[in-house]
Image (spheres, rainbow, N blue to C red):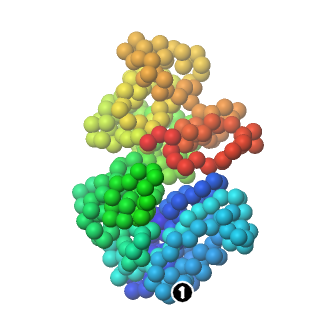
Amino acid sequence: MREILGDVLTTWHSGGTAGLATVVRTFRSAPRAPGAALAVAPDGSVAGSVSGGCVEGAVYELAAEVVATGSPQLQRYGISDDDAFAVGLTCGGIIDVFVEPVSRQTFPELPALADAVDHDRPVAVATVIAHPDARRIGRRMVIDSERRDGSLGSARADDAVTDDARGLLLAGQTGVLSYGPDGERIDETADRGMEVFVASYAPAPRMVIFGAIDFAAALTRQAGLLGYRVTVCDARPVFATAARFPTADEVVVDWPDRYLRAQQDLGAIDNRTAICVLTHDPKFDVPALAVALRLPQVGYVGAMGSRRTHLDRLARLSEAGLGGDELARLSSPIGLDLGARTPEETAVSIVAEIIASRWGGGGRPLAALDGRIHRDREART
């Protein structure tokens, strides 16, 4: 809902009620991931999307109904419908959409949520989407690392969901949690009773690029399109300037290894962070990689250079004391084999490898593969 939060908040401040539809679960080749949302304002205008167009009309009508009745609904769309092409997903996927009325009365915590998202403070929203007691459907909590606001209907349920939601938030993950009707822990065979959708609003993932070169400028632009908060770092002040990297979130003049150690001490590196070493100069990249490959949590570490440079780099890193498991974390030469030539094409190959690493993709043409296109979760958590 991040991209339409401002639209929903406008309706909230006006005293009106918006119909909010959120994708909470997907199966097969669904076009939008859990968390994608569509909002219908009182004047009938629409913001956002839940399917890229496949079922928007049906969801629009359901949102209007939910606003009129005040009763949230969980609806499934897709090939399981009697007429898939009437209201289903022609791509063959299935999505579960939770539709609820949002107003000052139903969501008093909305301004606090928006403020946390605007200021990059990690926050999660846990909403009951299914329960034997219809009165508990739509109840929610807003949860951060220290407090929670709202209630799901019982202290036991609140405690259980708070613990699990904080775990999802720490990993930057969104999804459905299942419990017994009062928040009881259950096994795979037990009656779930209560389902809770947890939407995590974690700060944007980071990409740290070492080496203020033309390839870094192209990678900065490409990473920005994917939602990364990008830092460009180089020890040479004549190259590391904001004017040369206008799309970077920050440009830092520092030795790469020293900067990376400082970021680690600050807790600013996590398992979603991508580190790209583009200097292909041993005095810069070997010390930086020696730090990066020893980090307890990092999503991706890649280094640019020829195969000869790569072999020399591995030898230097081995001399620096790195073992086989640590060296195996290094993606070098960086990027997928796309036949890239220009800095812009090379940037595409780098982010393609990061995406494949994140989701467990193989980087092969989809036309050459059988089975599902989309994966349910990240390969690295």
User: Which x, y percent locates residue 289?
Assistant: 42, 26
Q: Is residue 312 above or below residue 171?
A: above
The quadrant holding residue 151 is bottom left
Residue plotted at (54% across, 84% down): 65
User: Which x, y percent locates residue 267?
Assistant: 30, 41
Q: Is residue 167 above or below residue 348?
A: below
Residue, disc 1: 43
Identify which residue, 282 or 63, lies in the foreground: 63
Can residue 189 be seen at all in this image of the molecule? yes
Which amino acid, by three-letter code, is at mark 1?
Asp
User: Which x, y percent locates residue 6?
Assistant: 44, 72
Can residue 203 be seen at all in this image of the molecule? no
Residue plotted at (48% across, 23% down): 328
Residue plotted at (33% across, 61% down): 183
Identify which residue, 189 or 67, lies in the foreground: 189
Label 1 secondary element: loop
